[in-house]
Image: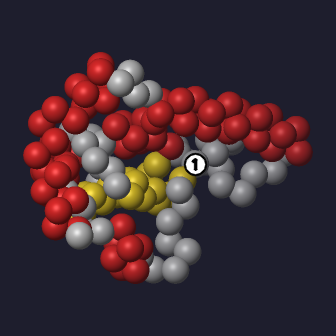
Amino acid sequence: HNREIEDLFDSYADTFDSHLLEGLRYNVPNLMREQFAAFEEGSCSSATRRSTTTTGACNNERRRPFARCLDLGCGTGLAGVAFRDVCDYLEGNDLSSEMVAKAQAREGVYDAVGHGDAVNCLRRQPDASVDL
């Protein structure tokens, strides 16, 4: 089954972004990032009032609040673009080799992009090694 799915998305890779963004007006990664920013802002306000923070996200100890992020089913990298600024290390993974190539072509977004199914990607991750 994975081969058929990979073939489908391989054939879709060249038009994927334009179809989602223009045709379907897909904006989920940006909407998720906006919600994340609102949550982070509220958390930082609370942390500042308490003068404590565990991640350093609110007191500038770290540039980004998450040390390691994993984007499963990254496709062409739309979510990676939206979340890059909160991840010290951002790894993408996708079943489609053509989608992986598109994600890798986005300069400055991913630190690494793997090719394979999500379950095997997760199995390769050390326990508790991913923050987001």
Residue 119, visible in the rendered structure: yes
On screen, residue 5 versus residue 49, left or right, reads left
Q: Residue at x 45, y 80 (%)?
A: 126
Secondary structure beneath disc 1? loop
Q: Position of residue 53 (x, y in %)?
A: 75, 51
Q: How many marks?
A: 1
Q: Position of residue 55 (x, y in %)?
A: 65, 54
Q: Residue at x 38, y 73 (%)?
A: 119
Identify residue for label 1: 65
Q: Which quadrant does the N terminus fall into?
A: bottom left
On screen, residue 50 versus residue 6, left or right, reads right
The front one of 92 and 13 is: 13
On screen, residue 50 versus residue 117, left or right, reads right
Residue 89, visible in the rendered structure: no
The front one of 91 and 76 is: 76
Q: Position of residue 44 (x, y in %)?
A: 74, 38
Q: How is the image coloured?
A: secondary structure
Q: Please rate how many residues cluster around mark 1, counting C-alpha atoms within 10 Å: few if below 14, some from 14 to 19, many from 20.
A: many
- Residue found at the very far right of the displayed protein: 50
Q: Amino acid at mark 1?
A: Pro
Q: Position of residue 71 (x, y in %)?
A: 40, 54
- The answer to which quarter of the image holds residue 26 is top left
Q: Residue at x 44, y 52 (%)?
A: 88
Q: Residue at x 55, y 74 (%)?
A: 128
**Picture layout, residue 129 above or below residue 85:** below
**Picture layout, residue 47 above or below residue 94:** above
